[in-house]
């Protein structure tokens, strides 16, 4: 299930004056961000998700550029997940606007898969005033493929018997996992369609693509696809991080430190929400000329507190940054994650493990609850030191 132009559709729903107009969500024109999503009216001009906003402005000078509203989009996404559970308990969100649903055990309750999908689409349209595209198939890869065949507001069912006549003639770029570089390499081998890839010798693909060659072959045939996993069945995250691209290049250390503090708060909140702590912290730094460096360090202590994360990130930044060039982007991420109830913690109290004492340990949950109720900007720490 893939929502149609999700962020832009929400903005058009909430502001009827935007309907039928080229809406581009991601930031104001001229800013350095990228397009988060855009309406189908904007796509007609060649605007696509992930495109720099400057390029979007060049292609669509009369486009309506809007800042993202994460709180509103997340609220709608939560309502969608609740609807999905009316149709199956096995729901795996893969992004804010896209989910896999295993309806194997639910089909008979609705008669058939088409009736189930139509009912779901109608509920979303009635309750949220949004449209979605649904793809149904026997594997995740083919279901994902099917969602894109008749967008927007599409419903496509791919039966196993239709593989040769419907799937195999499609361009290989339609497959999940086949990006621009991979497709270019496949074209050099004479592989242009999914059928070409499915029939290509697996041994030759492994020679050119290594371990990914076998996976590409299996994906083209609709094989080697993992089961759909509900949220409580999904494996733990390997890392948690956030980045920030400055509107203009900066050298002001105070501005950079304050940005690191905000990023540390975001990372810390996600760690605590997921019940994680991490030992390895990474600092990403991109200069004005796009030269990018990453430095990481593994601590003897586990981190999940905002201040502890910030001080470690600040230390790494000072170690990496020479002050020669302006900074375009900074990012913080935590890896080597463990659950906070893991055996590594034993009987040790949190204030002994984390870099900050009991006072901060009591303040942080209160700040988290305030943000949960009133939004990210309701409370923050004072200027970074």
Image: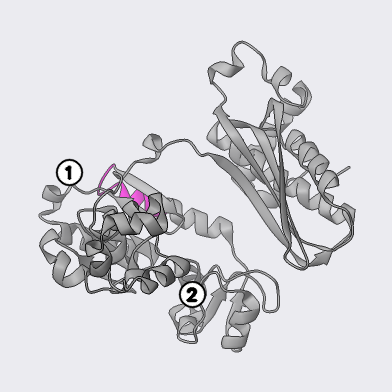
- Mark 2 residue element: helix
| Horizontal arrangement in the rendering, residue 138 relative to residue 121 (left or right) | left
Label 2 sits on residue: 12
Residue 320 picture location, percent across and down: 81, 48
Start and end of the magenta stretch?
Answer: 79-89
Number of marks in the image? 2
Please give the residue where the numbered disc 1 appears in the rendered image.
105
Question: In the drawing, what numbered circle is on residue 133?
Answer: none
For the question of whether residue 69 can be seen, the reply is: yes
The local secondary structure at tag 1 comes to loop
In 3D space, how far apart are the residues under numbered discs 1 and 2 (Cα atoms)? 36 Å
The 10 Å Cα crowd at callout 2, few under 14, some 14 to 19, many 20 or more, is some
Tell me what residue is drawn at x 59 percent, y 81 percent. 56
For the residue pair 215 and 84, the one nearer the viewer reads as 215
Furthest residue in direction top, as rendered: 347
Does the magenta segment cover residue 31? no
Residue at the spot 24% in from the left edge and 56% down from the top edge:
222
Is residue 331 shown above or below 193? above
Location of the N terminus by quadrant is bottom left
User: Could you say where residue 225 lies in the image, as x and y percent from the top left?
Assistant: 29, 49
The relative height of residue 277 versus residue 262 in the rendered view (above or below) is above
Q: Quadrant of residue 52?
A: bottom right
Residue 370 seen in render: no
Please rate how many residues cluster around mark 1, counting C-alpha atoms within 10 Å: few if below 14, some from 14 to 19, many from 20: few
Quarter of the image for residue 351 reads: top right
Write the residue at 47% across / 81% down: 43
What is the quadrant of the C terminus in the image?
Answer: top right
Compared across the picture, whether 210 is left or right of 352 comes to left
Give the left or right position of residue 124, taking residue 291 as reference. left
Q: Position of residue 204 (x, y in %)?
A: 32, 59
Q: Earlier in the sequence, mark 1 or mark 2?
A: 2
């Amino acid at each position: 299930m893939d929502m149609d132009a999700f962020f832009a559709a929400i903005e058009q729903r909430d502001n009827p004056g935007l309907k039928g107009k080229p809406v581009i969500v991601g930031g104001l024109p001229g800013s350095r961000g990228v397009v988060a999503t855009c309406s189908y009216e904007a796509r007609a001009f060649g605007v696509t998700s992930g495109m720099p906003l400057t390029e979007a402005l060049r292609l669509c000078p009369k486009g309506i550029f809007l800042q993202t509203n994460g709180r509103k989009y997340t609220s709608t996404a939560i309502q969608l997940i609740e609807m999905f559970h009316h149709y199956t308990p096995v729901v795996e969100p893969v992004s804010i606007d896209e989910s896999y649903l295993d309806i194997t055990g639910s089909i008979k309750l609705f008669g058939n898969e088409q009736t189930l999908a139509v009912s779901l689409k109608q509920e979303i349209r009635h309750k949220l005033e949004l449209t979605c595209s649904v793809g149904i198939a026997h594997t995740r890869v083919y279901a994902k493929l099917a969602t894109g065949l008749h967008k927007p507001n599409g419903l496509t069912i791919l039966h196993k018997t239709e593989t040769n006549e419907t799937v195999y003639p499609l361009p290989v770029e339609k497959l999940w996992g086949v990006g621009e570089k991979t497709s270019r390499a496949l074209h050099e081998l004479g592989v242009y369609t999914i059928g070409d890839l499915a029939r290509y010798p697996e041994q030759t693909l492994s020679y050119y693509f290594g371990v990914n060659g076998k996976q590409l072959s299996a994906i083209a045939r609709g094989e080697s696809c993992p089961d759909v996993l509900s949220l409580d069945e999904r494996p733990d995250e390997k890392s948690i991080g956030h980045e920030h691209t400055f509107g203009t290049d900066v050298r002001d250390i105070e501005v950079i430190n304050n940005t690191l503090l905000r990023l540390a708060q975001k990372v810390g909140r996600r760690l605590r929400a997921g019940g994680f702590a991490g030992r390895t912290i990474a600092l990403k730094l991109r200069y004005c000329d796009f030269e990018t460096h990453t430095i990481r360090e593994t601590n003897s202590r586990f981190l999940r507190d905002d201040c502890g994360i910030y001080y470690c990130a600040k230390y790494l930044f000072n170690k990496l940054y020479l002050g020669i060039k302006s900074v375009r982007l900074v990012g913080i991420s935590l890896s080597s994650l463990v659950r906070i109830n893991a055996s590594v913690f034993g009987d040790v109290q949190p204030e002994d493990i984390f870099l900050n004492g009991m006072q901060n340990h009591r303040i942080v949950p209160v700040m988290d609850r305030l943000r949960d109720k009133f939004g990210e900007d309701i409370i923050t720490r004072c200027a970074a030191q």
